[in-house]
Image (spheres, rainbow, N blue to C red):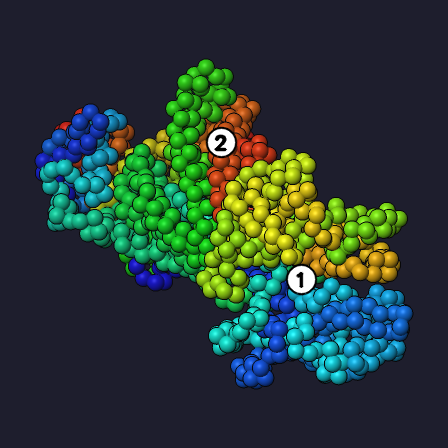
């Protein structure tokens, strides 16, 4: 067939509207895939920058000894930006009456390489950021140090052997959570003044940090170069490992976004399959007429092949455009919340969109069209000649395999793919089983039912195969929507429960037993909520079942048992937030030397329930038996301990107390009072860390909502396509019923029942599939605890019935509005 | 022009093979008109489908303008239809997305005939639809749709024209007008016309009349 004629026929087919439906499905599919994947790509880059912000760099070399100058030079040669820092705890003195233990951080030009250092000219003044660090000879103090030291701007403070001028207040550092040098409030100074202080001597507790920033390949190159040279006490901190809590949050968010993208691919495939199925069905007569007029099979195949190619091309181009617009809209909606400008999405999302369109067209749209070319021209004489199966099992199999491959490529996770595919497999298997039962059972029920039910059930049975397929596709779409909603809710729920609004935000250590009443009085007077006071003793496990454990540095093999030093406490009950994994808790007031061990710690020392441990506390050795193994929620912001003993066992050892408490921002100055009342205690301020974590969670949660909304929209569109795919048959039958004198109520009622039954069943199947997939995702991918979602079991069938019922009846509304003769002529 | 020898058509059913045509013999001269009459289910349309090369016989031979259909494959039979055969169907079989003119142009375009538009306009004028060129089938009456189908069938100037119950979906008066038109065009183009009908008045206007009864053909 000549090219010009192909175009002409294509243009005429386009006018018929059938191609338009297919193109629309294709455009929607590509837009959703491109939109979600470019949004995810850009968000990932933003989240990565966000992680880098917590490190103030892309990578940090941390060392207890000064770093070789050659490392700095090498980093420069590799094109990396760098900045050096030194951290240590020290006393700062304003005058004989005012001195404080502070956490000193000295920084050099360029700090921070990522994120922003915020400061102000006065303790609680206007925030500034951008480029500045304390000049040589100057220091910036944490706001509460001004009151503690009774100093103001321009005053001198003494650090070690040198005197420095207070020139500003340090308000927030990007790496405050990762660069902790001791527990006191921050004093920021310039590295140029370090030598003059004379504080940093061989053997002193100092941390040297080399901050590096640059292209990821340069970072990788430097990592490979420096790793073999690292000695004891030296390590590399990278973005991934910088902040376990935030890293987990970001990792899970990323998993969720990739999951959403994969679901978009499946929904896109479903929409295209439905549209092409309808296209093929409506195209049969067209092909028969063309053949009766002398068109040959290969000419028709060529025409359809070209049509599909150009449609795929147009669909991909338009879809990429819309998808790009969609992600741009998301980024703008989210813009105010994003801490950094998200990077470019690149070509990958467009490629994913194009491949999705190609795969769907080749495996789902092309096979039925190719077979149409072989349709008998006899159909023009005999309308009763059936249409060859428009889609065959082999097509679905090939298409299914290619979609799995696409999902895998897209999500980069076999586990995510497997969980979703398992859920979908359950839906498909149960769906066809249910359809079979319903369709055979429906007839016997229908016999006894009233006329509306009889018509509805007869309709369900007559289109048995088509209904089964439709129900399975409805179920798949609903399942994917339910799944994403459930995973989103549990992710956000988990994040919020990690950081409840009333979480303690300060730790207090080194409280002497006799100071307890003073502290409790202070908390009472100022209405400060605190956790229980835990006694704390430091000790070391030296042997398990009489076998002596090697010292830490003597063990080379990863994961081999070794001695570990840890904080011990005593408690007569299981500490809050801990979960017993093995064994049980001892009775109150037990004097038996039991111990409860944290699970990772138990693994490190190679201990299990019933084992006998030798524990060295100071000069004493204590023999104890492991009574239980516990898991501990390290992100709970409560005091947590590796080893817990009965009170009577540990009480005789000298120890200090610790607790955590919550201070509101306006109560912050109370810390100075607390430290003056109890000068020996150490306070760790975590309020900044918590604030940062909460802001990350908020941003990520908002992004998840947006992506969920898009997927819900895509799912809704699949449902609409599903309803439309069976529209012709339903319209024809309903028009016939009306022509035979059926009342409007009967026709509408029967349609309602038919779609409600299909939707309700699809919803029920979807709940089963979603639960299975959610279990897989939550336990295997997100490493969260799984709990069944009873709400989904009610909501799934209900939502399925209501949405599919309403969509179905709405799509068929013409049947009661237009005279039946008009409809019969049209369809 | 058309010669049929011992044509047999059986189709498989759940209860075994069902014989639809039992040894049909037929000969129609070039330029003649022939009617095949018979009751519903007698096998008329099956015979027409076989004669037009849209279906394959179980046994026997069909010769069309010197070519033996049973030796041609599906694509060769399609080429034969494109070159030599025109069709008029009971249910018109117009493409709903195409205008009247485009429906007539379609077979011309498929055969690569230049100026398909001009030819289509001329034939539509001949069937009295010059004012309906850009109308879509759904906006035309049954009679008008069948006239478009007739224009489409004659536009390619086929050697043979098959008509399957051409008045079956039309009222008597419209049917008569359509038949007048069909015979008029047929006479002018000297086409061989084969009609399948159960309308005896229509059959009487043909040169030859064959009767189909339970798969067997008798006459003329």
Question: Quadrant location of residue A435?
Answer: top left
**Which residue is labeled 2 in the image?**
A761
Question: Label 2: how many residues lie within 10 Å, few (<14), some (14-19) or many (20+)?
Answer: many
**Which residue is labeled 1 in the image?**
A338
Q: Is residue A386 left or right of residue A58?
A: left
Q: Are marks 2 and 1 in contact (CB under 8 Å)?
A: no
**A681 shown above or below A80:** above
Q: Is residue A318 visible?
A: no
User: Residue at 27% of width from left, 54% of height from top?
Assistant: A298
SS class, disc 1:
loop
Q: Quadrant of the N terminus of chain A?
A: bottom left
- Which x, y percent locates residue A399? 37, 49
SS class, disc 2:
helix
Question: Which chain does the numbered disc 1 sit on?
Answer: A
User: Residue at 34% of width from left, 63% of height from top?
Assistant: A3
- Which x, y percent locates residue A51? 62, 64
- Relative to the observer, which residue lies in front, A24 or A349? A349
């Amino acid at each position: 067939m000549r090219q010009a004629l192909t175009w002409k026929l294509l243009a005429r087919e386009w006018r018929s509207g059938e191609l338009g439906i297919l193109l629309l499905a294709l455009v929607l599919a590509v837009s959703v895939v491109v939109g979600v994947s470019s949004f995810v790509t850009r968000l990932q880059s933003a989240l990565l920058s966000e992680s880098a912000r917590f490190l103030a760099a892309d990578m940090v070399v941390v060392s207890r000894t000064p770093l070789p100058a050659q490392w700095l030079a090498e980093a420069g040669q590799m094109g990396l930006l760098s900045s050096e820092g030194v951290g240590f705890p020290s006393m700062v003195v304003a005058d004989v009456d005012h001195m404080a233990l502070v956490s000193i951080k000295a920084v050099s030009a360029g700090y921070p390489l990522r994120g922003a250092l915020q400061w102000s000219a006065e303790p609680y003044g206007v925030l500034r950021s951008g480029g500045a660090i304390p000049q040589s000879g100057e220091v910036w103090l944490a706001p509460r140090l001004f009151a503690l030291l009774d100093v103001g701007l321009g005053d001198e403070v003494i650090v070690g052997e040198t005197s420095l001028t207070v020139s500003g207040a340090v308000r927030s550092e990007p790496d405050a959570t990762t660069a902790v040098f001791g527990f006191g409030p921050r004093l920021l100074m310039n590295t140029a003044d370090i030598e003059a202080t004379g504080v940093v001597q061989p053997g002193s507790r100092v941390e040297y940090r080399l901050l590096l920033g640059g292209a990821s390949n340069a970072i990788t190159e430097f990592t490979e170069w420096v790793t073999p040279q690292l000695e004891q006490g030296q390590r590399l901190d990278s973005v991934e490992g910088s902040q376990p809590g935030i890293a987990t949050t970001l990792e899970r968010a990323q998993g969720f976004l990739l999951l959403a993208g994969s679901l978009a691919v499946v929904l896109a495939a479903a929409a295209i399959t439905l549209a092409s199925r309808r296209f093929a069905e409506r195209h049969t007569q067209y092909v028969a007429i063309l053949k009766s007029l002398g068109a040959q099979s290969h000419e028709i195949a060529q025409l359809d092949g070209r049509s599909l190619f150009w449609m795929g091309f147009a669909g991909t181009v338009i879809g990429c455009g819309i998808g790009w617009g969609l992600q741009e809209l998301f980024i703008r909606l989210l813009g105010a919340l994003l801490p950094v400008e998200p990077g470019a999405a690149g070509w990958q999302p467009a490629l994913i969109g194009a491949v999705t369109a190609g795969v769907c067209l080749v495996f789902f749209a092309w096979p039925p069209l190719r077979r149409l070319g072989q349709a008998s021209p006899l159909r023009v004489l005999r309308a009763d000649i059936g249409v060859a199966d428009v889609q065959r099992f082999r097509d679905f199999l090939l298409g299914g395999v290619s979609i799995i491959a696409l999902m895998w490529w897209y999500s980069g996770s076999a586990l995510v793919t497997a969980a979703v595919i398992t859920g979908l497999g359950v839906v498909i298997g149960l769906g066809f089983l249910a359809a079979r039962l319903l369709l055979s059972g429906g007839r016997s029920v229908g016999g006894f039912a009233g006329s509306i039910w009889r018509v509805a059930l007869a309709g369900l049975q007559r289109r048995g195969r088509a209904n089964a397929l439709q129900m399975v596709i409805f179920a798949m779409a609903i399942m994917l929507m339910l799944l994403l909603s459930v995973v989103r809710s549990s992710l956000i729920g988990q994040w919020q429960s990690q950081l409840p609004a009333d979480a303690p935000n300060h730790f207090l250590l080194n409280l002497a037993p006799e100071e307890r009443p003073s502290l409790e009085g202070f908390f009472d007077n100022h209405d400060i909520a605190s956790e229980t006071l835990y006694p704390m003793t430091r000790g070391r496990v030296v042997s398990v079942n009489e076998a002596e454990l090697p010292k830490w540095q003597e063990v080379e093999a990863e994961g081999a048992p070794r001695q570990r030093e840890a904080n011990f406490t005593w408690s007569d009950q299981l500490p809050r937030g801990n979960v017993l994994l093995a064994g049980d808790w001892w009775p109150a007031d037990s004097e038996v030397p039991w111990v409860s061990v944290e699970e990772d710690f138990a693994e490190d020392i190679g201990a299990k329930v019933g084992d006998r441990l030798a524990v060295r506390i100071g000069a004493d050795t204590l023999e104890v038996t492991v009574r239980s193994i516990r898991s501990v929620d390290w992100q709970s912001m409560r005091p947590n301990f590796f080893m817990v003993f009965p009170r009577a066992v540990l009480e005789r050892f000298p120890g200090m107390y610790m607790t955590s408490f919550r201070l509101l921002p306006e109560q912050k100055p109370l810390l100075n009072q607390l430290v003056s009342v109890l000068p020996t205690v150490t306070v760790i301020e975590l309020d900044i860390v918590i604030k940062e974590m909460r802001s990350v969670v908020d941003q990520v949660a908002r992004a998840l909502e947006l992506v969920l909304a898009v997927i819900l929209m895509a799912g809704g569109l699949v449902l609409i396509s599903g309803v439309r795919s069976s529209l012709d048959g339903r319209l024809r039958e309903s028009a016939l019923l009306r022509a035979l004198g059926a009342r409007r109520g009967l026709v509408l009622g029967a349609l309602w029942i038919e779609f409600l039954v299909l939707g309700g069943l699809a919803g029920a199947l979807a709940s089963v599939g979603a639960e299975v997939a959610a279990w897989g995702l939550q336990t295997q991918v997100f490493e969260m605890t799984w709990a069944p979602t009873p709400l989904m079991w009610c909501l799934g069938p209900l939502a399925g019935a209501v949405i599919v019922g309403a969509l179905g009846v709405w799509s068929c509304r013409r049947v009661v509005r237009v005279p039946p003769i008009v409809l019969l002529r049209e369809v | 022009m058309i010669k049929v020898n011992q044509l047999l058509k059986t189709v498989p059913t759940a209860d075994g093979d069902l014989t639809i045509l039992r040894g049909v013999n037929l000969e129609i001269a070039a330029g003649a008109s022939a009617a095949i009459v018979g009751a519903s289910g007698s096998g008329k349309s099956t015979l027409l489908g076989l004669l037009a090369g849209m279906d394959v016989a179980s046994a026997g031979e069909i010769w069309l303008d010197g070519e033996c259909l049973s030796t041609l494959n599906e694509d060769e039979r399609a080429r034969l239809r494109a070159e030599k055969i025109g069709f008029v169907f009971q249910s018109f079989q117009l493409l709903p997305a195409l205008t009247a003119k485009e429906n007539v142009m379609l077979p011309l375009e498929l055969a690569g005939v230049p100026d398909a538009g001009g030819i289509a306009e001329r034939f539509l004028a001949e069937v009295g639809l010059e004012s309906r060129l850009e109308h879509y089938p759904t906006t035309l009456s049954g009679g008008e749709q069948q006239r478009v189908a007739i224009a489409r069938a004659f536009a390619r100037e086929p050697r043979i024209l098959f008509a399957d119950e051409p008045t079956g979906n039309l009222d008597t008066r419209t049917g008569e007008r359509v038949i007048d038109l069909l015979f008029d065009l047929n006479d002018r183009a000297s086409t061989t016309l084969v009609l399948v009908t159960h309308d005896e008045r229509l059959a009487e206007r043909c040169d030859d009349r064959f009767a189909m009864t339970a798969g067997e053909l008798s006459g003329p």
